[in-house]
Amino acid sequence: MREPLVDRASAWFRALQDRICAALEALDGRARFREDRWARDGGGGGVTRVLEEGDLFEKAGVNWSDVQGELPGGLPFRATGVSLVLHPRSPMVPTVHANFRCLDKGGARGFGGVADLTPTYPWREDVVHFHHTFRQVCDRYDPACYPRFKQACDAYFFLPHRGETRGVGGIFFDEVGGDAAELERAFAFVRDAGDAILAAYLPIAERRRGEPWGEREREFQLWRRGRYVEFNLLYDRGTAFGLETRGRTESILMSLPPLVRWVYDHQPASGSREAELREWLKPTEWLG
Amino acid sequence: MREPLVDRASAWFRALQDRICAALEALDGRARFREDRWARDGGGGGVTRVLEEGDLFEKAGVNWSDVQGELPGGLPFRATGVSLVLHPRSPMVPTVHANFRCLDKGGARGFGGVADLTPTYPWREDVVHFHHTFRQVCDRYDPACYPRFKQACDAYFFLPHRGETRGVGGIFFDEVGGDAAELERAFAFVRDAGDAILAAYLPIAERRRGEPWGEREREFQLWRRGRYVEFNLLYDRGTAFGLETRGRTESILMSLPPLVRWVYDHQPASGSREAELREWLKPTEWLG
């Protein structure tokens, strides 16, 4: 007999965390993940892995969790998933974020996920590769879903007070499921999407880690990271939900960049490569 | 005939901004404030002054504003006030924040304000001096109000996800006023409190700026500044109100520290001076 869906999803996410961490350690080549296992007062727990001060990654966090309890209205819930945020040291290598999850709210189950890219210096071919990878995953599931998931991603990762997106988007989906057969299809899609994160990101990191950069590029990166912090603390629903439900603070906030600078009313010089980024921070059709 | 109260308050706040900036430039001795005058689409505007990369101050912001419009429910409002956030370069000199304001909501007027201190390395005499200065101001107004305003400050500047206060508190009050005579008394109190910020802070900055510090203290300061960012973006009502009502983003977020570090699950070494700070980050009766 098959295990219940949420148990299978939880186990699959746990194994995905292992595969991702192994690949990232191999890619980094220097630093290793430290692991913290934690239990949640309300039920369940997780495994947080963080790598700091690596050769490629200044900070990389990969979380797995499987928690349960009661929602504010009293409805029992169980949520399991994996999430990652990678902050490279080189401003030439983009920051990436992804999470894939399965949620059961009083028996109503569904899958959700997101994968989005935040370059400091943009190369069009990198952005196209990232989107293309996930469009292929979407197309195998339902050719109608990439445009929808891409648009949802642009809408979600938007900073209204800055009038710009957090990065160049990706895919965002929520509560994908339905009856038993649809849930199985959704789970298959999430497995495909979860496996795609390495294929989407590793080639970009590999081809950009050797690009030269200096103090100017580093300063721009630290300043851009401020916007990442602003989004995560002001708008991110996962961060707010985690803190409100008294999740493990250090696991939730591992998403914050390691070093960040705020400069009053800073404007990159007109015509510079830094100013050009601004044009990328709006919903864009990357795939022609 | 006297000008209406809110006009007088606005002019007084504007003059306070001038006095504070002049005193801070003299104290810093190197950098000068740059000034940005801005108009708000909905009505009114302000003057933002920021000093960066000074000798004493890594970043100092002093805002004045006088804005009007309609609240979400349609009620006309006018708000005027001055706010400041000072981030010294030396970890031995505390960060300080204050704001004093007058609010008219559909004819219901009142004064509000706050002054609070956030040391990186704590000296008890500094904290006592800061609280003592504002207790004297409170006592001249109403001896019952210091304990109340101090408690409100501790309650407001609290980070539930960290289980700690932002700093060592100060005073916090809101909607102080009543009939015409009470409003005049409240205005006199706010003038007294506004003038006290320099008396409360300058002696501390002067006696600590010469204290030696190095890389270890700087790293601790950058890490502690992360908590300041977390509070301002996650919980500060003024920041949320400003961003929601489409205030000038750079004026609102000038409160953020210049350089900040997040380190996963960092714990200062047990018994260290850095670990000792934790004991200060809870509501404490500083004045015996």
Image (cartoon, coloured by chain):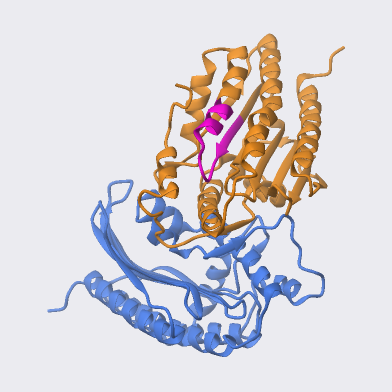
Chain colours: A orange, B blue
Q: Is residue B215 left or right of residue A159?
A: right
Q: Nearer the viewer, residue B68 or A168?
A: A168
Asked if residue B125 is positioned above or below residue A102 in the image, the reply reads below
Asked if residue B137 is positioned above or below residue A2 in the image, the reply reads below
> For the C terminus of chain B, which image quadrant?
bottom right
Query: Where in the figure is residue A215, as x and y percent of width and height?
Result: 55, 59
Instruction: Decide whether residue A124 is among the magenta residues.
Output: yes
Q: Nearer the viewer, residue B137 or A121?
A: A121
Residue drawn at (53%, 89%) of the image: B206
Query: Where in the figure is residue A127, as x and y percent of width and height?
Result: 53, 32
Query: Where in the figure is residue B97, as x and y percent of width and height?
Result: 48, 72
Query: Which quadrant of the structure image shows residue A10?
Result: top right
Instruction: Give the total of numbered labels.
Output: 0
Q: As drawn, which residue projects farthest toward the left?
A: B1
Residue drawn at (62%, 35%) of the image: A204
Asked whether residue B65 is in view, the answer is: no
> For the N terminus of chain B, which image quadrant?
bottom left
Query: Where in the figure is residue B56, as x and y percent of width and height?
Result: 51, 80
Q: As drawn, which residue projects farthest toward the top?
A: A181
Asked if residue B9 is positioned above or below residue A240 in the image, the reply reads below
Instruction: Decide whether residue A43 is among the magenta residues.
Output: no
Asked whether residue B96 is in view, the answer is: yes
Q: Is residue B229 left or right of residue A103?
A: left
Asked if residue A216 is positioned above or below residue A83 in the image, the reply reads below
Query: Which quadrant of the structure image shows residue A186?
Result: top right
Q: As drawn, which residue projects farthest toward the right?
A: A1
Q: Which residues are magenta?
A: A114-131
